[in-house]
């Protein structure tokens, strides 16, 4: 086991959404769930991040932003799509400005379902993201 | 035993001390916020991970500058314990900090650049104090080396209570604690994205973290200078001071750079300067 599983730093981006999943992601940091127990940090800086956690769907305006954030993250990196909108476009899927899920613009490693996704399932998604991160590190090392 | 052995020991054990201190800091901070917090060794896991991660340099000059930063920070502690002149140490610490400013200023990110400018401001705020502190310690004990100060029968803190007070304030800058952490957000905060370290990834960030551990250990050594009756007394004083710093960090919000500069200079002039002046007037 490497240090990646003990210190996954997260960059959270919220696309086109109702902000429900956004709030649930922040709930993970509160005393009830306290993800810092597992070494998880919400960095807010793509160059420090290991996991890109995206809530909400892709629209015309945020394609470049998501791709830019993804490109700025150093290897190894994984993307976790949180909630129905990030997975497939969700309830907004047929709106005129929506492209669909996050996998339309960047490769997604873990899909976390739910509307809104519960904090327990978000933490579970991050744990699966860590496994994917570990696999990528072994491939590049 | 030659004092240089203590210098070598500092090079090896200061990062262990600084890393454990950072781990305790994160647990205590979490408990203050009603959380459990990460494991004690979390800072070591973080640095271990950063060393395994890809390091992207925006400007190839960043890595040598950051190596200079961590190198001079480590060497300043080793020189202090090795018996070098105290005033000289104050200048080397400032030089080490300047390397970080240059590294952060050499990239294009406006956040990093703003962080570098603010770091210069906090250097301007803290450095006069450290020079005055060293001069005051030399004046009280008549010694210019670490071992000399420790051998002095005078307890420096009793003679210089004002300097101890000002040290508590200025240490907030050096430990990167709120309300003075304007140049770089340390873990729980997000100011200017990450200020100075915005464009540093992988091992670059690990160097900054390592230098910070050395700096924490160096501040502990400064505390031993002020409480020079025994090294244990200095450690106890540092532990109390650090607990206060964590409390202040968790209960204050960040202030503007003008107020940082004003408050630290007023503390330096009023507490430390007044203290030294009083000693002169009392004829000691």
Image (cartoon, grey):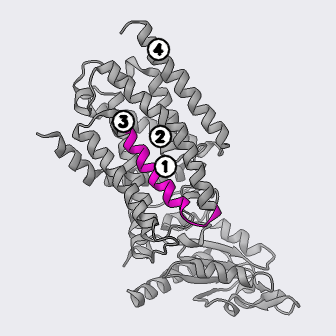
The reply to whether the C-beta atoms of the residues labelled 4 and 3 are less than 8 Å apart is no
- Depth check, mark 4 against mark 2: the one in front is 4
Q: Residue at x 27, y 43 (%)?
A: B79
Q: Earlier in the sequence, mark 2 or mark 3?
A: 3
Confirm whether the magenta stretch covers residue B103.
yes
Q: To which chain does the residue with label 3 belong?
A: B
Residue A86 visible in the picture:
yes
Q: What stretch of residues is rendered in magenta?
A: B90-110
The reply to whether the C-beta atoms of the residues labelled 2 and 1 are less than 8 Å apart is yes
- Depth check, mark 2 against mark 3: the one in front is 3
Q: Residue at x 53, y 72 (%)?
A: B58
Along the line of sight, which residue is nearer the eye, A2 or B185? B185
The reply to whether the C-beta atoms of the residues labelled 2 and 3 are less than 8 Å apart is no
What residue is pinned by disc 2? B243
Marks 4 and 3 sit apart, C-alpha to C-alpha, by 21 Å
What residue is pinned by disc 3? B222
Where residue A78 appears, as percent x and y from the top left, is 55, 83
Where residue A10 appears, as percent x and y from the top left, is 57, 72
Q: Quadrant of the C terminus of chain B?
A: top left
Left or right of residue B252: residue B135: left
């Amino acid at each position: 086991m490497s240090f990646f599983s003990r210190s996954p730093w997260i960059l959270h981006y919220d696309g086109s959404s109702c902000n429900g999943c956004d709030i649930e992601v922040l709930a993970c940091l509160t005393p009830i769930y306290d993800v810092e127990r597992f070494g998880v940090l919400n960095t807010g800086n793509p160059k420090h991040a290991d996991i890109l956690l995206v809530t909400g769907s892709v629209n015309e305006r945020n394609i470049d932003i998501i791709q830019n954030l993804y490109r700025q993250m150093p290897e190894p990196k994984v993307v976790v799509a949180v909630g129905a909108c990030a997975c497939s476009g969700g309830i907004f899927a047929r709106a005129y400005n929506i492209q669909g899920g996050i996998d339309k613009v960047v490769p997604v490693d873990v899909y976390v379902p739910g509307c809104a996704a519960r904090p327990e399932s978000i933490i579970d998604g991050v744990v699966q993201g860590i496994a994917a991160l570990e696999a990528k590190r072994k491939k590049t090392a | 035993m030659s004092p240089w052995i203590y210098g070598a020991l500092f090079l090896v054990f200061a990062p262990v001390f600084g890393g454990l201190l950072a781990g305790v800091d994160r647990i205590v901070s979490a408990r203050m916020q009603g959380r459990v917090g990460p494991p004690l060794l979390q800072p070591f896991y973080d640095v271990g991970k950063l060393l395994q991660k890809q390091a992207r340099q925006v400007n190839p000059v960043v890595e040598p500058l950051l190596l200079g930063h961590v190198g001079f920070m480590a060497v300043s502690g080793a020189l202090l314990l090795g018996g070098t002149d105290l005033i000289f140490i104050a200048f080397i610490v400032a030089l080490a900090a300047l390397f970080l400013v240059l590294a952060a200023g050499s990239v294009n990110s406006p956040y990093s650049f703003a962080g570098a400018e603010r770091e210069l401001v906090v250097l301007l705020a803290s450095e006069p104090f450290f020079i005055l502190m060293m001069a005051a310690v030399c004046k009280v004990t008549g010694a210019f080396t670490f071992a000399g100060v420790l051998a002095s029968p005078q307890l420096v803190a009793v003679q210089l209570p004002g300097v101890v007070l000002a040290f508590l304030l200025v240490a907030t800058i050096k430990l990167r604690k709120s309300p003075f952490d304007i140049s770089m957000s340390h873990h729980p905060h997000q100011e200017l994205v990450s200020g100075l370290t915005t464009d540093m990834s992988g091992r670059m960030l690990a160097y900054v973290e390592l230098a910070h551990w050395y700096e924490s250990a160096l501040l502990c050594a400064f505390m031993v200078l002020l409480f020079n009756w025994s090294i244990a007394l200095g450690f106890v004083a540092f532990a109390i001071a650090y607990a206060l710093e964590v409390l202040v960090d968790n209960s204050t919000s960040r202030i503007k750079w003008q107020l940082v500069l004003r408050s630290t200079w007023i503390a330096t002039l009023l507490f430390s300067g007044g203290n030294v002046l009083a000693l002169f007037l009392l004829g000691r």
